[in-house]
Amino acid sequence: MNRVFNFNAGPAMLPLEVLQQVQAELLDCQNSGESILEMSHRDPIYDKINTEAQKDIKDLLGVGDDWCVMFMGGGASLQFSMVPMNFLESGKIGVYAETSSFSDKAIKEAKKEGRVEVIFSSKNEKYNRVPKLSELVLPDNTAYLHITGNNTIEGTEYQEYPDTGDVPLIADLSSDILSRPIPMEKFSLIYAGAQKNIGPAGVVVIIARRDFVKNREKTLPSMMNYEIQMNKNSTYNTPPVFGVYIVGLVAKWLKAQGGLAAMKERNESKAALVYAALDAHPDFYKAYAEKASRSFMNVTFGLPTPDLEKLFVKEAAKQNMKGLKGHRSVGGIRASIYNAMPREGCETLAAFMEDFYIKHKDEPKTEI
Amino acid sequence: MNRVFNFNAGPAMLPLEVLQQVQAELLDCQNSGESILEMSHRDPIYDKINTEAQKDIKDLLGVGDDWCVMFMGGGASLQFSMVPMNFLESGKIGVYAETSSFSDKAIKEAKKEGRVEVIFSSKNEKYNRVPKLSELVLPDNTAYLHITGNNTIEGTEYQEYPDTGDVPLIADLSSDILSRPIPMEKFSLIYAGAQKNIGPAGVVVIIARRDFVKNREKTLPSMMNYEIQMNKNSTYNTPPVFGVYIVGLVAKWLKAQGGLAAMKERNESKAALVYAALDAHPDFYKAYAEKASRSFMNVTFGLPTPDLEKLFVKEAAKQNMKGLKGHRSVGGIRASIYNAMPREGCETLAAFMEDFYIKHKDEPKTEI
């Protein structure tokens, strides 16, 4: 099998070992005589999968029993609505930092549910940076501050999280969850679509303080009520069984890799390879994100001309690298290098970038 | 591999051929060099999977381009809220027929969103039947009539659907979707969690008239707005890619079996085997559902004593039959025999029932 380096922004690569295990046991899950795809969510085998996945994620994050882990469907986009529906009390303000078109979507959904204030936006800078912490000043009556931890389209990422004191901090960590240690003491709730760093599309992981989730409004749709999901241990209704199973396998794989500190080292070192190739030729490769905001998950840059960018993507594909085209809203190139992207993928990309530079550096650099 | 006959109410069995195909191509989807579990929902391969799955479902149901097929996460339980949020206009009445605790859940969620009237309930008869069509009288100002096509817990199923004229008919067909032809001309929207008849847990299939879905309120959460999902072809956000892929494979399998008319024949004949075993000894096996309401998907019955019921489940397990315990709310035995349950499973169960009867018919039949 010719396994490609898949640089797509998500869904994204999964660890080969995990895929091989899934394949090996696909017809018979733990000698049950049935596939995990057929298994009742009330089966003791699934109960163990669900419980262990929650525990392994809590272990990785270093949180205890005052936290809960929930698995839901609907993607991070449903969380954009669930967060304000659950936590934006009347008379209070949902406060947002706008660092990407995905934060903008979260803001738009929140505005349907209550009063919202955007205290930081880098929209006029084309979302090329996240805020300095000093730029995040909370108004009185803040219900919560919502941030987007990593911005896939633009390739920016918080290197430090704000300290909001008594005000709950909520984060969409869809694109950097479990890629490095997270200072959970700062957060009340984080959520993440699994399909970038920790699993397949179709399951969202929510990690929240139990106290924060308690006492939700009874008038909320049951499926959108975090308290019900917590109390029912993510089996209020039939959960996305297969997705939870894979998230559990990835969590075990992350533990086996040495946990989040080891992943941070590995991911930073992978990103450093690509950023070094980028910074070596600043007249040719134009980094999109401000240096202080650079993401370790998505490296974004432009080339001198759109034609060269097209050629870059095309030539890279010949060397087994796929998904390098930037998001349509910013163009250019984007290399997404999540947890499961092997170091070899980043090495191959960095070498290709140097080679491509040498071949094309003397071509006309401006378009007509 | 010792493959069990899984009689669970859902998630449930999938066709072995489908599972084998999933396994064979799990590491490399259509020579892409990546797993379907890693594939971008913007990849042309997924686009084709999504398009074909929609088309195959429409072909099976015999509907054309005035209908749309949508795939979402969140399960049927999220649809319980989405239906009234989308279609229960102020000043109108959401009308429900209550035939199970699942319809009751749908009713409870609808009441959070607007005015609701329950025009039929078999709750006092322990949900042992669905209504006669003459029992469904719509009040003025009905926004829609919502029915639950098949009731897994009690084993009842509509044999004929009401004709509601200009009033939209909406149905939760989670447990009998694509098990037989459906007179789609009567419906405006049907929805079904995939995990019983057509796929794994984690994906819901919605089939709706395009005209009905158009012009939804802009204030709805985007993820809960059917119009957005329709217009974005179920890729408004990252969909449950793997679930849609399997639903697509099952739809092709159903076509290869001869389509829904053939499935109806096969499913009726499977159910007939089990009902015959049941009816052969009415003093021993007590059918739960009224005869006219009997489900072809879930056969429910009691034995003379709870101890015999426990023994029945235990002995059946020794013969490779799993998941026969009835739902906790009604007790007894439940055999769920969806599309992918092989005829052999029903034969084995029927033979076991006869054998169990002979062995235990003379035991004391009343409890202390």
Image (cartoon, coloured by chain):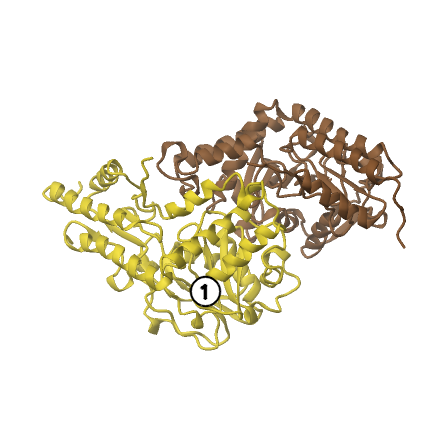
Chain colours: A brown, B yellow
Quarter of the image with the C terminus of chain B is top left
Direction from residue B281 to residue A15 in the image, left or right: right
Q: Is residue B284 above or below residue A268?
A: below
> Which quadrant of the view contains residue A334?
top right
Task: Identify the residue at image location x=62%, y=24%.
Answer: A259
Looking at the rendered structure, the number of numbered marks drawn on it comes to 1
Residue B104: x %, y % from top left: 42, 57
Circle 1 sits in a helix, a strand or a loop, which is it?
A: helix
Question: Label 1 lies in what chain?
Answer: B
> Which quadrant of the view contains residue B313?
top left
> Which quadrant of the view contains residue B348?
top left
Answer whether residue A144 is visible to the viewer in this image.
no
Quarter of the image with the N terminus of chain B is top left
The answer to which of A48 and A223 lies nearer the viewer is A48
Task: Identify the residue at image location x=58%, y=29%.
Answer: A58
The answer to which of A298 and A240 lies nearer the viewer is A298
- Disc 1 residue crowd, few under 14, some 14–19, many 20+, Cα 10 Å: some
Direction from residue B57 to residue B13 in the image, left or right: left
Residue B247: x %, y % from top left: 47, 52
Q: Is residue B151 above or below residue A39?
A: below
Residue B120: x %, y % from top left: 38, 66
Kind of residue at badge 1: Asp
Q: Is residue A52 above or below residue B250?
A: above
Q: What residue is shown with label 1?
A: B59
Answer whether residue A46 is visible to the viewer in this image.
yes
Residue B361: x %, y % from top left: 12, 44
